[in-house]
Image: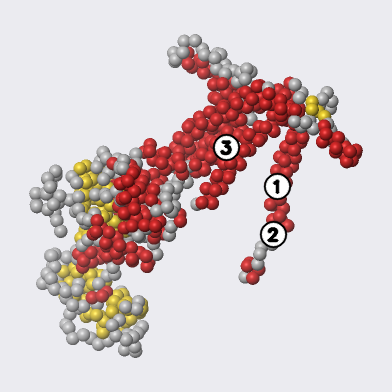
Amino acid sequence: MEAMLATPKRSAAQKFLIALPYAWLLVFFLVPFLIVLKISFSESAIALPPYTPLFHLAAGWRGIEDFLAGLSFANYARLGSDPLYVLSYVKSLGIAAVSTLLLLVIGFPIAYGMARTPRRLQAVLVVLVVLPFWTSFLIRIYAWMNILQHDGLLNRLLLALHIVRAPPVWLATDTAIYIGIVYSYLPFMVLPLYAVVEKLDHSLIEAAADLGCPRWKTFWLITLPLSSPGVLAGVLLCFIPIVGEFVIPDLLGGSRAPMIGQTIWMEFFGNKDWPAAAAVAVVLVCLLVTPIVFFQHQAMRAADRS
Amino acid sequence: MHTVGSIQGAASTADGNPRPLLRIDGLTRRFGSVAAVDRLSLDIQAGEFFALLGPSGCGKTTLLRLIAGFERPNAGRILLDGIDLARVPPHRRPLNMMFQNYALFPHLTVADNVAFGLKQEGLARAEIAGRVSDMLALVKLGSFGARKPNELSGGQRQRVALARALVKRPRLLLLDEPLAALDKKLRDATRFELMELQRQLGLTFVIVTHDQSEAMIVADRIGVMDGGRLMQVGTPADIYERPASRWVADFIGDVNLFEGRVGDDRRSVEGTAAGRLVVAAPIEAEPRTAVWVAVRPERMRLARDKPPIPDNCLSGTIVDIGYLGDLSIYQARIADGSRVTAAVANTGRHDETTPQQGDLVWLSFPAEAPIVLLR
């Protein structure tokens, strides 16, 4: 009994377990990010690696001073002055916002329907939602190229049903990007929504009806507010990766106005300008981390209150 | 109490009784092959406090949900004020329900929970605020309006649920096990508050409960349910003193049952485990019909010596004594090996004259005590 009441001392195994996720984040997130951050303050050079200054530990204190003197904010200044970057950011955030909204509008009825299905069928439905993951993401996007191309499945279907007279252009448009994104990210929206809606107490819906509230209004007044943790999770889970999405706009979208992922790729592989690419990436991370921190803070405060 | 009339739409039925507020007519609700409610008919008058009492799974909650509109009947009708509710969706029914788990909206404050139903009616802001604060005061939660449901105790939550339903001034309030989640002390106090509220507001309450003492205390009439059917409807005294069947007699309180056949004089039952038993009122059955004599334990008298009466005496050995303070429950084994229960009020001092385990005693009851049951 006394041993149980004493302050619990963490064993070595417990400390190791706690340290594990921190070590993971340190090695695979923080260190790479610091490297990218450092590169973003460098200048492009024809060298290997293609930027300067480099960090010479052998030169001692003098080496560090040289290194710090060589850093510059020039890349960041360029981000603001060149409209290419600004337009890229705006387009990425715009596409991410619209597709997240679309995902929410499509995903919520799916999640709600799943949660209202008899329990033994729900497991099957969950498997069906994640079933596309069995196939490579890249292959699925190539399949969409096939479907959306000039004489693809979609146009042939539209022509056969006499919905259109001439085949419309789908590929290399923003519409194709939206189709690809909504298709690819739907499970990431449906699953967190389902997890929350499934736990909703159905008697609350009945209570609302009992108090004179029609169905559609009950959705706005009861179901949606009580699903907000799932909505928030789904929105973050979709919005953040969509902003940085590269494959979908590259394969399905046009080349006129690139999304930010394409811009980074272009700087990195096309222009071989690592510092510029790094600066674009750092700004992107800052743009995304700010809302996460904000929403996390809100969620924590909401959790504290209840 | 009243009979079922046949004329609808008039203020009173042909037999002169006022039209019932709620009429349930041949209602059936099946889940798969099981009928949770089975061809059930029932009238409830305005201003009544009616209890649906039965063991779990008897269909009482399903009946309540059918009235509220959360379940649709397979057959039969529900009429409220003479209007068929079949095509009226739950949110348009002029009745309210208090849910067993209270179903308070966790994201709304107490005041917003209570105001929810009034907002749906599109009332003016000022009127809503007035009615909400009046109602919160009535259930003694005047200073709790700004709290969230999870900041309240179980008893307070129960009051919010009650206030939320009552503030709509429903024609009929349905209460699904409203006190089941409360501890005993609070439950006892709340029972009387419920009765007080019902009288004060002049409303019609239909309560569902599995607790017979709760039903007996609060209700004007009780409907005892089993297997989706009403076994008996009557006042608490009716049901306790004149049960319609062995099942009801056994379900409501404790009872000693003696099986036998009606004697030729129709004032006795012969061949029971306790021999020939005499009853005061003539039995409404042919001689030699199989019947059961039911005697409540508190009508049994217990004595050490043979009582000086000729009939309804049986001897036995005490095998078990349950001391409850106000009462003692004696179990005695009689000649054929069956047990007979007697409840004796502990009016005197508990001393060595009170019967002990293993003592030989005499059990007797007056001829007015037994109820003869035909089924």
Which residue is found at the position 69% from the left and 31% from the top? A281
Q: Which quadrant would the N terminus of chain A be assigned to in this image?
A: bottom right
Q: Chain of mark 2?
A: A
Residue closer to the observer: B94 or B73: B94
Secondary structure of the residue carrying numbered label 3: helix
Whole-percent x, y for residue B141 in the image: 37, 58
Distance CA(mark 1)–CA(mark 2): 17 Å
Q: Residue type at mark 3?
A: Leu
Image vertical order of residue B268 relative to residue A115, above or below: below
Q: Which mark is residue A227?
A: none
Q: Residue type at mark 1?
A: Tyr
Q: Residue type at mark 2?
A: Arg
Q: Chain of mark 3?
A: A
Whole-percent x, y for residue B41 in the image: 21, 50
Q: Can you see residue B38?
A: no
Q: Is residue B226 left or right of residue A109?
A: left
Q: Is residue A105 left or right of residue B44?
A: right
Q: Which mark is residue A22?
A: 1
Q: Can you see residue A213?
A: yes
Crowd band around label 2 with a 10 angstrom C-alpha radius: few (<14), some (14–19), many (20+): few
Residue closer to the observer: A275 or B82: A275
Secondary structure of the residue carrying numbered label 1: helix
> Looking at the image, what colour scheme do you see?
secondary structure
Q: Earlier in the sequence, mark 1 or mark 2?
A: 2
- Give the residue number, with chain letter if any, for mark 2: A10
- Give the residue number, with chain letter if any, for mark 3: A236
Determine if marks 3 and 2 fall on one subunit: yes
Crowd band around label 1 with a 10 angstrom C-alpha radius: few (<14), some (14–19), many (20+): few
Image vertical order of residue A93 relative to residue B124, above or below: above
